[in-house]
Image (cartoon, rainbow, N blue to C red):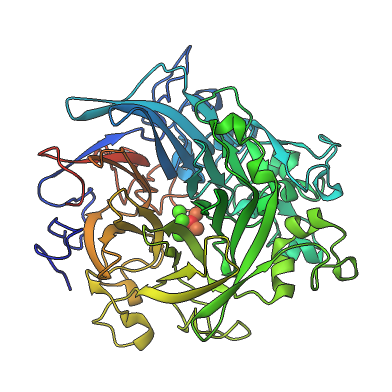
Amino acid sequence: ATTSGAGGALLGFKSVAISTADTVTVPEGYTVQVIAPWGDPVGLSGENTAFKDDASNTAAHQETQFGMNHDGIHYFAQEGSKSGLIAMNHEYTDHGLLFADGTDNWNLEKVRKSQAAHGVSIFEVEEKGGKWAVVTPSPWARRITANTRTELSGPAVGHALLKTAADPAGRVVLGTINNCASGITPWGTYLTSEENFINYFSGGDSLSEHEKRWGLRKGGGGYNWHQHDARFDATKNPNEPNRFGWIVEIDPMNPSSTPMKRTAMGRAAHEGATVAVTKDKRAVVYMGEDSRFEYIYKFVSRDAIKEGGATANATLLDHGTLYVAKFNADGKGQWIALTHGQGPLTAANGFADQGEVLIKARQASDLLGATKMDRPEWIAVDKQGWVYTTLTNNSNRGADKQPGVDAANPRVNNTQGNIIRWKEDGDFSGTTFAWNHFIMAGDPSLERAEAKGSIKGDMFSCPDGLWVDGRGVLWIQCDMSTSAMGKGDLKNFGNNMMLAADVNTGEARRFLVGPAGCEITGATGTPDGKTMFVNIQHPGEPANETSDPKNPRAVSNWPEKKANGRPRSATVVIRKADGGIIGT
Ligand code: FEO
Ligand code: CA
Ligand code: CA
Ligand code: CA
């Protein structure tokens, strides 16, 4: 099911075929260059230790190097399309690859290296003769890790649920973790999200209702930081998990600035944060919570965006209203405010104040009757004002004791995912909207009706990353899980891929296929449209602590292709050989 050649005016390239090759495939006439792999120096001044092929770099080295598992990314132009800063997320660590001996001899040094491979990299890039390079050293280069000082701001600052022994004021948090998708603000800052933060914490034998609702487990989710860093032992520091799950604002142009956790936008397993602007210049931030049966949120700022960049708008995201989405069966929907004292959000129902509503946004959304979605991932807004969200998949939809289908999430055992979109009534601040399904992903050759999909053009599954480029093309990135890839409903899709969609015709055209075991996530570009940066995450998965740590490279050795080389997440730079605009 491929199309090629002629098509809508937006898409001018010949689509690439499905592939299982351990390489990045792009259309004829395009070039691929790799930059910024995990472990290369980001360009801090002083000593910069190179990546060691056997992963024997120390925690101190890792603090100066690109982290693991690149995700959200954005290019901030400095000299237009010739040089700029890139801010980039590092979502999680794979301990089988991060250490020469995997998880053997687990100790504090290993925990610190894992923590240092998390967070955000800010680095300078420049183009010379069509080739891009990371500038080292650079005065803007910065690593933000799981131990970097950040501050809380907004209505929940100082809340009793945010206070810890180390921070009795409830105001200063070390680090940001599980940074997944990203966004940018019109005033030049970067928004990073804290997605599956709960997996880093270990709970006790008995869990509170609050801990259960957020998925805390005894032993945590496999990172084992709690064994050597008590901050992640929730039996000793029960409020520490409440200090994660926020949208974090970072000013990339100011390397000494403090990353700010913006509590007014609520707490969730946030996939990302995408900003739109109302006619009266208020910021509207759309956020998905990627977890089965969780919610879609939007925040509307109280104040208008001011001239004067990051300094003038330093508290803009601290004041406003948070809403959660309800999709109705008639194609309409509502945004319901998470405002203390309104409806069920009262002290009698367990919400002492607005801070508690924000910290317990999931419980508040449950009471408000919001729609439980099929894992909302990235969000993008097109030139016509449609807001798109990927609902990546949800194999539990319709299962025993699980929610059944609804109009917005219409498939039982949703293995393929879909892209839903809505348009606000009036402006982005509107409290009602109209919605439809842009694309139901799937494979038309399958028997099962729920797995066939309704794709015009090239088939794909499990949409996740979204980006609207300067021409209005909707780029769709896929994240079929590597445990399901190549089997069952996913048997015909090959490796994860990226497609370009024409939002006017609905056509999707395959533009890139990634190396073995990877996910494609995060895209950005230069203002002239001639360079695109795309992240290749976890090539070679599975190669984790459950596999042989002495041979974690069985699936892939991308990008260097060295014999027995470790696979490394990296950024690929895509250009047209003739120097033209990407996608034309
Ligand atoms: Fe980190 Fe939902 O992907
Ligand atoms: Ca994702
Ligand atoms: Ca995903
Ligand atoms: Ca991922």
Residue 152 relative to residue 332: left or right: right
Residue 83 relative to residue 232: left or right: left
Q: Quadrant of residue 535?
A: top left
Is residue 506 shown above or below 244? Answer: below
Is residue 197 shown above or below 291? Answer: above
Q: Position of residue 135 (x, y in %)?
A: 35, 21
Residue found at x 41% / y 40%: 74
Which of the two residues, 571 or 491, is positioned nearer the viewer here?
A: 571
Residue found at x 60% / y 29%: 311
Asked whether the viewer can see residue 415, the reply is no
Q: Position of residue 273 (x, y in %)?
A: 53, 52
Question: Ligand 4 appears in which quadrant?
Answer: bottom left
Residue found at x 62% / y 56%: 299
Q: Position of residue 198 (x, y in %)?
A: 65, 54
Residue found at x 11% / y 39%: 577
Is residue 534 shown above or below 467? Answer: above
Asked whether the viewer can see residue 298, the reply is yes
- Quadrant (top left/top right/bottom left/bottom right) for the N terminus: bottom left
Q: Position of residue 252 (x, y in %)?
A: 50, 30
